Amino acid sequence: MTVLYDSVLAVVAAAGLLTLLRLVRGPGALDRIMALDVLATMIIAGTAVGMAARGDPTPLPVLVVLALLAFIGSVTAAHLVEKREGMR
Amino acid sequence: MNGLERARRGVRHLPMIAWLWLLWILLWGSVDLEVLLGGLAVALALVAAFPLPPALPRAVPRPLRIGALLVHLLTDLVRSGATAAWQALRHGPRTSAAIVEVELRVDSDLLITAVAELTTMTPGTLVAEIDRRRRLLYVHTLPVHDERDIHHRKSEVQMVERRVARAIGHGESFEGFDGIDGPSSRRKGG
Amino acid sequence: MNALNTARDAVTAVLLPAGAAFCLLGALGLLRFPDTGSRLHAAAKAQTLGLLLVLVGTAVQMPLRHAPVLLLVALFQLLTAPVTSQIIGRAAYRAQALDHRLLLRDELAERLEREGTPAYGQEREADEEDEGR
């Protein structure tokens, strides 16, 4: 089982790195917002795998808060971008 | 009279109170007396402070249809995840898309929201713009090669709409219908 | 009891790698797709599916009092992912971040051209009133 968890974590980490690449590359603000949102879900996924590996439920509230924050953050940021474009 | 009306209004909030209470208990992960009482107090306070209009005015619950909708949602999610992944691998930068206008027949905020959510979960479609007043969805669809694909996508979205209307619409089972949403999911033509 | 544990491990051993694979595919889509609109497909679908699989796979391993919270997070994700992607998609269209050469057909633009008015004219006015400008 340990091998399984480790390899799953490695795959999620690789996915996170790829997402980070998109975050750096952009090109638009919306692409970065999207990449950040995806990154947040990857952090949630990684934390969950870590929890399963150790059988330790301590980070559970972190997952809940992260899920809430990612949603509110992305929606707010996207809304602001839209508004800014509308001003032009 | 006044008391009766007030009691009825209280009953309408019961599902929300129950849901908030359940949420509190789940988040605490225990059923101690403090948690139970505290949760009830918080739920009551929240509903009193931020009352929401009922989303489904005295709807007839159709658990079977709602269950079918959920099963569809999960299978659709798996299929659409697979399609999006396949598109990314196979075509990548040379994918072709279209923005398609879909006319809806349902006319209530809740139903349109549900249709939009589920459309995003069906393979290859993603709602980009909603025109609430004219009941139009503008759907960004991904693997599109010709006009036939576009027609196909449109009918897919309308199938989602039909499923939603059957599960939670209240046009078909008219009894107890409040009139708040107008004559919503009544069938117009085919 | 032991059989139950084996069953749990089996479910986890299927769901977690599948979830991780979809996460990776979602990230690949995010990188490979050419414009914001198509990238959204990868983010909204492959990614959500990946996270959902991972969360369920983890919930199976957790003691009964913690598992529902994970499912709650999964449910929340299921409800919010379409909302996020719709709002980003709408913003992308209005900010002209979509690559129109990739679009076989754009019925929203066709309609805007037909009517000569932005579909969201009223909304934008309301937004501007909000800001007091």
Image (cartoon, rainbow, N blue to C red):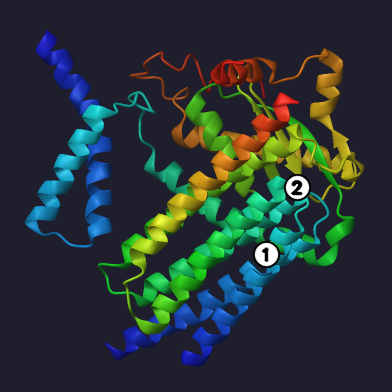
Crowding near the residue tagged with mark 2, few <14, some 14–19, many ≥20 C-alpha atoms within 10 Å:
some
The residue at the point 75 percent across, 47 percent down is A28
Q: Earlier in the sequence, mark 1 or mark 2?
A: 1
Observer-nearest of B80 and A42: A42
Residue A76 percent location from the top left of the image: 55, 40
The residue at the point 72 percent across, 61 percent down is A24
Left or right of A1, for residue B145: right
The residue at the point 69 percent across, 40 percent down is C89
User: Residue B134, relative to residue A29: is it above or below?
Assistant: above
User: What residue did someone put label 1 on?
Assistant: A19
Distance of mark 1 from mark 2, alpha carbons?
Answer: 15 Å
What amino acid is labelled 2 in the image? Gly
Please identify the quarter of the rendering in which residue C102 is found: top right
Examine the rendering and report whether any part of residue B10 can be seen.
yes
Please identify the quarter of the rendering in which residue C72 is found: bottom left
Viewer-side label of 1, 2:
2
What amino acid is labelled 1 in the image? Thr
Examine the rendering and report whether any part of residue B129 can be seen.
no
User: Residue B63, relative to residue A82: is it above or below?
Assistant: below
Q: Disc 2 is attached to a residue of which chain?
A: A
Left or right of B60, for residue B132: right
Q: Quadrant of the N terminus of chain B?
A: top left
Left or right of C32, for residue C64: left
User: What residue did someone put label 2 on?
Assistant: A28
Q: Give the label on residue B140, or none.
A: none
User: Residue B96, relative to residue B44: is it above or below?
Assistant: below
Left or right of A50, for residue C42: right
Residue B157 percent location from the top left of the image: 67, 38
The residue at the point 68 percent across, 31 percent down is A84
Q: Secondary structure at mark 2?
A: loop
Q: Disc 1 is attached to a residue of which chain?
A: A
| Same-subunit check for callouts 1 and 2 | yes
